[in-house]
């Protein structure tokens, strides 16, 4: 049970998550959800979680994600628009927790430079 938390703390430290930042988390599996909790603990103010499972996104909502987007059958450009709309701009930092190629592409396109 400690390994997912250690991964999340390490990722959030490397990403330099700080108070007031907006964060996109791609993937609402075990690692994504623990990253969500870690981002909240480090002070991120807006956290958007994407996934292809509505059930996982409901869990993310219960854990405090400010926004959830189901990207199943959604093209990358539409996902970029929805994320920017919900976060009122591009996320400061993105944590890619799914490993899916389309999710990695989305993260690159939507995130602010250096995030």
Image: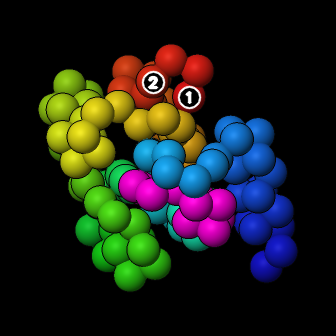
Query: As displayed, is residue 25 above or below residue 14?
Result: below
In the rendered image, the quadrant that contains the C terminus is top right
Residue sticking out furthest to the front:
20
Residue at left offset 39%, top offset 66%: 65
Label 2: element kind: loop
Residue 112 is labelled as 2
Q: Which residues are magenta?
A: 38-47
How crowded pointer 2 is (Cα within 10 Å; few <14, some 14-19, many 20+) is rated as some
Q: Which residue is mark 1?
A: 115
Q: Who's the residue at 65% across and 60% down the image? A: 42
Q: Is residue 64 left or right of residue 4?
A: left
- Residue 50 place in picture, x, y as percent: 36, 52
Residue 50 is left or right of residue 8, and the answer is left
Q: How is the image coloured?
A: rainbow
Asked if residue 6 shows in the view, the reply is: yes
Name the residue nearer the viewer: 9 or 72. 9
SS at mark 1?
A: loop
| Residue under the image location 77 percent in, 47 percent down | 13
Cβ–Cβ under 8 Å for marks 1 and 2: yes
Residue 52 in the image, given as x and y percentages of width and height: 32, 55
| CA separation in Å, label 1 and label 2 | 5 Å
- Residue 99, placed above or below residue 56: above
Where is residue 56 shown, x and y percent of the image?
38, 71
Residue 19 drawn above or below residue 66: above
Quadrant containing the N terminus is: bottom right
Residue in the foreground of this view, choosing between 55 and 86:
86
């Amino acid at each position: 049970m400690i390994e997912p938390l250690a991964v999340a703390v390490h990722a959030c430290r490397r990403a330099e998550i700080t108070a007031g930042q907006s964060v996109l988390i791609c993937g609402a599996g075990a690692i994504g959800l623990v990253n969500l909790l870690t981002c909240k603990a480090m002070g991120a103010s807006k956290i958007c979680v994407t996934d292809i499972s509505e059930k996982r996104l409901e869990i993310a909502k219960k854990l405090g994600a400010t926004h959830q987007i189901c990207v199943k059958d959604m093209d990358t450009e539409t996902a970029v628009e929805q994320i920017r709309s919900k976060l009122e701009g591009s996320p400061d930092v993105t944590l890619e927790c799914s490993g899916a190629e389309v999710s990695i592409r989305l993260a690159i396109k939507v995130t602010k430079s250096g995030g």
